[in-house]
């Protein structure tokens, strides 16, 4: 059985891999498991990659992942920033994704109306 210190060490390793280390860097993660794909996550992913490239955003990585765990709100996009900040966007479309890249990723202001915090679970 794992001890609390074992679990804390595992947590620290995961956080170290997920969150960017340098201020200003962002990691965008899009759920592309079967649930995400069937809900339209691939066009969302493609639009985010395109928008990041068009805006010339350095220090931004775009990554596909498996199931995020709240399938009824797919497509899901999570933005991880240094310092442990995370914003989870739900029910995304390519148009919403472009706005998130423009306003949140490039501009630094999360688009709160698309977040899980503003969704009735």
Image (tube, helix red, strand yellow):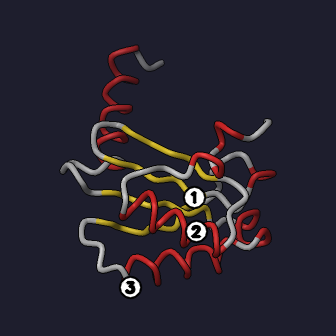
Circles 1 and 2 in contact, beta carbons < 8 Å: yes
Q: Which of 48 and 100 lies nearest the eye of the viewer?
A: 100
Name the element at disc 1: strand
Q: CA distance from mark 3 to mark 1?
A: 19 Å
Numbered tag placed on residue 77 in the rendering:
1
Q: CA distance from mark 1 to mark 2?
A: 8 Å
What residue is at 31 percent from the left and 28 percent from the top? 9
Whichever of labels 3 and 1 marks the residue nearer the N terminus, that label is 3
Q: CA distance from mark 3 to mark 2?
A: 14 Å
Q: On the picture, is 119 further left or further right than 117?
A: right
Whichever of labels 1 and 2 marks the residue nearer the N terminus, that label is 1
What residue is at 58 percent from the left and 46 percent from the top? 112
Name the element at disc 2: helix
What residue is at 47 percent from the left and 84 percent from the top? 50
Q: On the picture, is 39 further left or further right than 118?
A: right
Q: Which of 117 and 62 lies nearest the eye of the viewer?
A: 117
> Which residue is at the far left?
22
Callout 1: 10 Å neighbours few (<14), some, many (20+)?
many
**Residue located beneath label 3 in the image:** 54
Q: Position of residue 52 (x, y in %)?
A: 40, 76
Q: Position of residue 43 (x, y in %)?
A: 65, 80
**Residue located beneath label 2 in the image:** 97
Quadrant where the image shows the C terminus: top right
Q: Position of residue 23 (x, y in %)?
A: 20, 49
């Amino acid at each position: 059985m794992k001890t609390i210190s074992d679990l804390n060490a595992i947590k620290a390793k995961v956080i170290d891999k997920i969150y960017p280390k340098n201020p200003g860097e962002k990691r965008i993660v899009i759920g592309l498991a079967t649930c995400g794909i069937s809900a339209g996550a691939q066009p969302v992913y493609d639009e985010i990659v395109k928008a990041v490239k068009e805006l010339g955003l350095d220090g931004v990585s775009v990554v596909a992942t498996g199931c995020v765990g709240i399938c009824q709100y797919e497509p899901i996009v999570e933005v991880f920033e240094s310092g442990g900040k995370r914003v989870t966007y739900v029910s995304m479309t390519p148009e919403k994704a472009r706005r998130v890249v423009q306003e949140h990723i490039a501009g630094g202001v999360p688009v709160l109306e698309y977040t899980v915090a503003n969704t009735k679970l």
